Image (cartoon, rainbow, N blue to C red):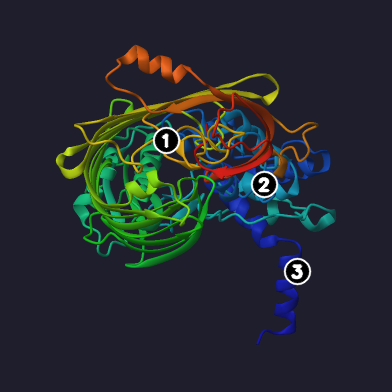
Amino acid sequence: MATQREEDAAEYLKKHNIIELLDNLSCMLFFHRPEKPREFLIEQLEQLKISQQTGMEGPNLFNNANLDAVFGILDPTNQKHITFAQYKQALMTLGIKDINECPDGANEDRISHKTFKTEAPAEGAWSGSDAAAASRFGASSPFCSGYLLSTTFPGKRPAELSMGTVHARSLDPLPMRGPELGVHPDDIEAPEIEHEQKQEVLENKNVVVQQVHIDGLGRTKDDLLTYEIKEVFRAKNLIDVMRKSHEARQKLLRLGIFRKVEVVIDTSRGDDALPNGLDVTFEVTELRRMTGSYNTMVGNNEGSMVLGLKLPNVLGRAEKMNFQFSYGTKETSYGLSFFKPQPGNFERNITLNMYKVTGQFPWSSLRETDRGISGEMSFPLWKTSQTLKWEGVWRELGCLARTASFAVREESGHSLKSSLSHSMVIDTRNSSILPRKGGLLKIHQELAGYTGGDASFLKEDFEIQLNKTLYWDSVLSASMWGGLLLPIGDKPTSIADRFYLGGPTSIRGFSMYSLGPQSEGDYLGGEGYWAGGLHLYTPLPFRPGKGGFGDLFRTHFFLNAGNLCNLNYGEGPKAHLKKLAECIRWSYGVGLVLRLGNIARLELNYCIPMGVQSGDRICDGVQFGAGIRFL
């Protein structure tokens, strides 16, 4: 047990933060390495005392150049923004405690360079306040989260400076009153400095990455990771090493096989070490062989509970097996999938699926059960994302109610569809749920019947969206959907393959998929359709909750229009366009939008439907919608 004197001494050190003060002064000493260390320490203490008394900037190892370097590491592709998670982690690892949780751009998950540099000083990291002293003293170079630099002096223990773990402790409050720090130069014993050649790593000095190590591997194959880290060897200076190491770290995390990846940058050691040589070590923690998950999912005006079982990195090269069971308000499904990326090019991958899906479609009094297998290959091409897919499905259609129309009963039974499909996507939006800028182009084609089965058709559909930020934080959005279904041969198209339109996610003011061709109240879908929407999104009136929860809400004014019909393909394109231009349904209104992260969004609208045709079901007045894809 400690004696009373030892306890009193420990209490004294803790009360006046003596240990923290000495640690931070040591960091300053190691960084600057002054010729006269005693005078230097006294000068730092005097500056710190003045900064606390006047609020002026005190001793500081960071400057704007360092902040620019930190931001550059977090933004290696020069997009001029980082994510909110990167922003928060960077400030935390810089030693900042009171972080602004709602900076400009947080809702869009886009923190700009200007905001990052503004928020760092705003929280005291560069000011003369007591709470910032740890950040001012405790680091000497800008490092991103998960990085650690060891600067080695021969014959000495390495002095480690980390942004993943800030070694300098808080100095709140610093002992800066009275005679406690009445330091005289003669009271400080000059440390003995070994005048040996130091190994230094400087931001503006050319360096050579001699070795890259990966520690913590278990079942992961080495050759997979070689592709992800090879760019680190091409770095020319310290900042370049850190940037390329960050990029490699992001690639390793993207593989989905590691729970944690940290980077340690150290000076090279050993007989073959160069004076400007560096060793980079990636310390990884692999995911468990089996993981489970439970969550809820929001679809287009429906919700479901999802249970999942995942086997990551099954064969050691980022393969993934996934079993998923979903129980929803309108659909129940389970499936098994296998995912395999191409080593060195994660965007190139193949996926194999086996599944069973049972869905209910009350607007058509239809129940459908699909049992199928599919294989798809995804790859980037120029600025697009391409997907090729083959799917074989055994479909079972049945009536959902005894009152189902004869047209639906006639469609009931079993069918087999074997189809080839291709999709192309160009997406420059900053958010898929509630974008503020950018555009989307999506084109999909499906050809059925040529690889077997009794369904034969050619199906084409597209989606276009453009978004533009206007004045007063408002956004103008325009979108258009369209599609054609062409039967091949004499057999008509199936009710399961046709297009449907209407509802809170497409043409608002109409009931869910309840416009177009119908029989005895059951909607049968159409072979051709188009739909367009124009939206003006604005902040809430008077901006309640600005900078916080209120920024998740938007007011929007909308105008929707479209049409759905069956086409006589013997009449020609002009007749088709004329038919699609007849009997246009449209609506307008105002509503409230709530963004649920980047997962889904909710809408509560007041709708006024116009152009209503005989047989259409409308929702005049208040209408609620939930989903991930809105017109």
Residue 118: image location, x then y, percent: 66, 33
Element type at marker 3? helix
**Three-letter code, disc 3:** Tyr
Q: Earlier in the sequence, mark 3 or mark 2?
A: 3
Query: Mark 3, mark 2: which one is toward the viewer?
Result: 2
Tell me which residue sits at (43%, 59%) in the image.
157
User: Can residue 342 be seen in this snapshot?
Assistant: no
428 vs 617, nearest the viewer: 617
Q: Are marks 2 and 1 in contact (CB under 8 Å)?
A: no
What mark, if any, has residue 86 been given in the picture? none
- The x, y position of residue 359, in whole percent, is 41, 54
Work out whether mark 2 precedes mark 1 in sequence or the reverse, and give the earlier one: 2
Q: Which residue is mark 1?
A: 239
Which residue appears at 66% of the width and 42% of the height? Answer: 125
Residue that label 3 marks: 12
Q: Secondary structure at mark 1?
A: helix
Is residue 156 left or right of 561 when viewed as pictured?
left
Q: CA distance from mark 3 to mark 2?
A: 30 Å
Residue denoted by label 2: 99
- Picture coordinates of residue 146 (x, y %)? 46, 51
Q: In the rendered view, would you say 144 is above or below 188?
A: above
Q: Residue at x 53, y 54 (%)?
A: 303
Residue type highlighted by circle 1: Ile
